[in-house]
Image: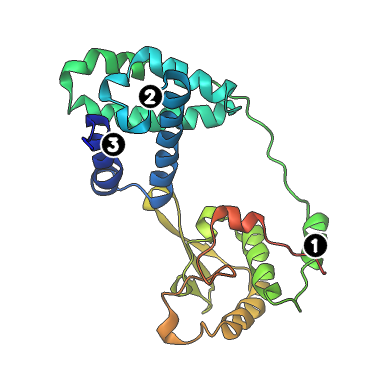
Amino acid sequence: MKKTNFAIYLHKFLTFYLTNTRGSTPQTIDSYRYSFILFLTYMKEEHHTPADKVDISDLTYNNMISYLDWLQTARSNGIATRNQRQSAMNSFIRYLMYEFPEQLHEYQRILSIPIKNTNQKAISYLKTDGMALLMRQVNLNKRNGLRDHVILSLLYTTGIRVGELIQIRVKDLSLQDPPTLLVHGKGQKSRYVPLMRNMIPSLQKYLTQKKYDDPSKMNEWMFKNHMKEPFTRQGINYIDVSKK
């Protein structure tokens, strides 16, 4: 099967450019990858063009407008998600500008498509009593009860994102005075976050339970799922802390 120029340059973009030139995180690359899966789906459903037939010439202003509208109508994507997909496509378009300068005018038209404004929603959060009630629901006698307790405690007391939590390795945790956690954030930026002292006993117990106090396990992921693999963001959502 003959490869299209779209397939060739998309492969270079996702595999080499984002990783080596942009230094993008695996999470960013995965998000971009899914954006292109949706674009290929759009081309098949709306233009009857299978994935292996999509060409660079299909990246037009009119197609991009139609694709973004399709995301909101056919896929029921919200404005924020639509903007995220548009950002991924724009990044690819900027990459292509230096590969196909003869298409510069059309690419400039695509990049001129405005990002839609979104209404900023007030962030909801649990108050102290609500969080205390949630923590009491964790059954510490369950197989992963202590793990779940530590996960919830870290998220609440440090304010780190779930995406940051699942990237924690044992070596990132320091229980020496003052106790800190090395957090790896977006854009490969890292920062130290102080830990509340009342968390130390639970953390020490968790390290002992998982045998993470063994120096040979410093590179192990701090939190793993039932498959002994690092958690995904979706996996954290499915944690059941009920007392059953």
Residue topped by disc 1: 132
x 59%, y 21%: residue: 73
- Residue type (three-letter) at the residue carrying disc 3: Leu
Reply above or below: 6 against 224: above
Query: Residue 51 sits in which quadrant?
Result: top left
Viewer-proximal residue, 152 or 75?
75
In this rendering, the label closer to the viewer, 3 or 2: 2
Task: Please report whichever mark, 3 or 2, sits nearer to the chain's N-terminal start.
Answer: 3
Q: Is residue 89 left or right of residue 144?
A: left
Q: Is residue 106 above or below residue 23?
A: above
Q: Is residue 161 visible?
A: no
Quadrant holding the N terminus: top left
Of badges 1 and 3, nearer the viewer stands 3
Label 1 crowd (10 A; few <14 / some 14-19 / many >=20): few
Tell me the distance, in whole angstroms, between the alpha carbons under discs 2 and 1.
54 Å
Q: Residue at x 32, y 13 (%)?
A: 109
In this view, the residue farthest toward the front is: 1
Residue at 63% from the left image edge and 68% from the top image edge: 196
Task: Give me the disc on residue 10.
Answer: 3
Q: Which residue is mark 2?
A: 49
Tell me the element at label 3.
helix
Q: Nearer the viewer, mark 2 or mark 1?
A: 2
Q: Earlier in the sequence, mark 1 or mark 3?
A: 3
Could you tell me which secondary element the residue under label 1 belongs to? Answer: helix
Q: CA distance from mark 3 to mark 2?
A: 17 Å
Q: Amino acid at mark 1?
A: Ala
Where residue 135 appears, as percent x and y from the top left, is: 77, 65
| Occupied quadrant, residue 233 | bottom right
Neighbours of disc 2 within 10 Å: few (<14), some (14-19), many (20+): some
Along the polypeptide, which appears first: circle 2 or circle 1? 2
Q: Could you say where residue 216 lies in the image, as x and y percent from the top left?
A: 41, 85
Q: Amino acid at mark 2?
A: Thr
